[in-house]
Amino acid sequence: MAHEQQNAATSGAYLLRGAAILGGAAEDLLIRDGIIAARGTDLAGTEAADGATVIEAAGLVALPGMVDIHTHLREPGREDAETVETGTRAAALGGYTAVHAMANSNPVADTAGVVEQVHTLGRTAGWVDVRPVGAVTVGLAGEQLAELGAMADSRAKVRVFSDDGICVHDPVIMRRALEYVKAFDGVVAQHAQEPRLTAGAQMNEGDVSAVLGLTGWPAVAEESIIARDVLLAQHVGSRLHVCHVSTAGSVEIIRWAKARGINVTAEVTPHHLLLTDELVRSYDPVYKVNPPLRTDSDVQALRAALADGTIDVVGTDHAPHPSEHKECEWAQAAMGMTGLETALSVVQETMIETGLMGWEDFARVTSTAPAVIGRVADQGRPLEVGEPANVTLVDPAARWTVDPSKMATMGRNSPFAGRELPGKVVATFFRGHPTVLNGELNTPFRHGPYQDTTASATAGGY
């Protein structure tokens, strides 16, 4: 990609010339004043493109800016692991223009005050939209509903609620949460893990755990909670979202629920699309994660489910940790992996290069569907005239080797370290502003007056 400095404009206008829109035919996209102002061929030299900065995009794929439904930004209170600033820099480099920040900060995001703080930190940073996820229960303790209505009415306009990292295991509390969020078209995102079945668990329960002598984490611990919750969602007529699905059995339950018309959506992480529990034989804590890495048959089932729409979205579950929490013995290590800067490449390798989906499907699972689930109105939109200019340019032919020390995230716990991956983000446009150019951070977007970006209740049919 050539960035023609001699045509640099001060008006916020950019001409992306010759990009393959969603992997299709090469076209030009003109971005001006934060929207897509024109789309077509040979726009260069036209009056509409006058004064625009030209981005040579031949050979690149243009996608709607990616939206992560599941990110841990750690701030407030856990700034030794990540901050909103560093995490959103990583997101921009990964092709994202919006992320949903999980509630397990310190203090927990269980009040209007905390979610507004996170929202403000995101606007100040200016790299992506930061949509706070509100806790379901006070302090993630699973005993009392948090201030769901107050968080929904706050400036952060919270629509996704989750105790992620901890399961809402009490069925009465879960039912009440599902009933409560109906009032403002919210969704409860469940971390499906029956705690009594995973006490002391260290990895997936199976042949490898038996050989290694590590306490196993059975698939049924996830599947039993999903089965319960889809029935609860059906009973109260509410929206349920299942976080980081990891087993073939979970896929079948979600497929059954959707066939019955139950309003359930689900996500899969990049690492569960690629990695298996065989890696735990190394005892390298970088592979310790919740839910755990599963078997190859689970991986294949997850890929097929993402391709056929049973699983709706890819969520990174980006979980950075300080090095001392991962560079220790397995039993003491924290669970979690980074993912924002590698997600696009992993999905390209596992889904596109295997022929399971094309770039249009990629846009659906990484942008359109997560924006609709999170009710974010101006993200995940088609690359058409008049739409918000949240755009990612990808070089699908690029190959790169993952080096965590060179990443923007503070976390060095990438399970893909040293691995060669395909595809590289070349540019990210957030609200028409290039936060990433030539594969490197440019400058953040500076917000004007506050605007409500919560979508309508019927958006996208979810």
Image: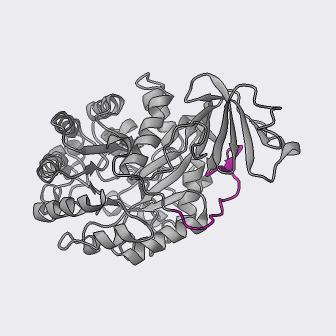
Residue 434: say if magenta: yes
Q: Does residue 345 appear anywhere in the picture?
A: yes
Residue found at x 50% / y 65%: 82
From this viewpoint, which residue is outermost toward the right?
Answer: 6
Residue at 58% in and 52% down: 92
Would residue 257 be counted in the magenta stretch?
no
Q: Nearer the viewer, residue 212 or 348?
A: 348
Asked whether residue 315 is in view, the answer is no
Colour theme:
one colour
117 vs 34: above or below: below
- Compared with residue 28, is residue 101 higher up or lower down, i.e. above or below? below
Quadrant where the N terminus lies? top right
Residue placed most toward the observer, 191 or 337: 191
Q: Position of residue 205 (x, y in %)?
A: 19, 45
Q: Position of residue 326 (x, y in %)?
A: 42, 60
Q: Position of residue 31 (x, y in %)?
A: 68, 43
Q: Position of residue 441 (x, y in %)?
A: 68, 53
5 and 93: which one is in front? Answer: 5
Q: Which residues are magenta?
A: 431-451
Direction from residue 75 to residue 159 in the image, left or right: left
- Per the picture, the main secondary structure of the magenta-coloured stretch is loop
> Does 367 sit left or right of 149 as displayed?
right
> Is residue 331 placed above or below 359 in the rendered structure?
below
Residue 89 vertical position relative to residue 17 in the rendered view, above or below: below
**Quadrant of the drawing holding the C terminus:** top left
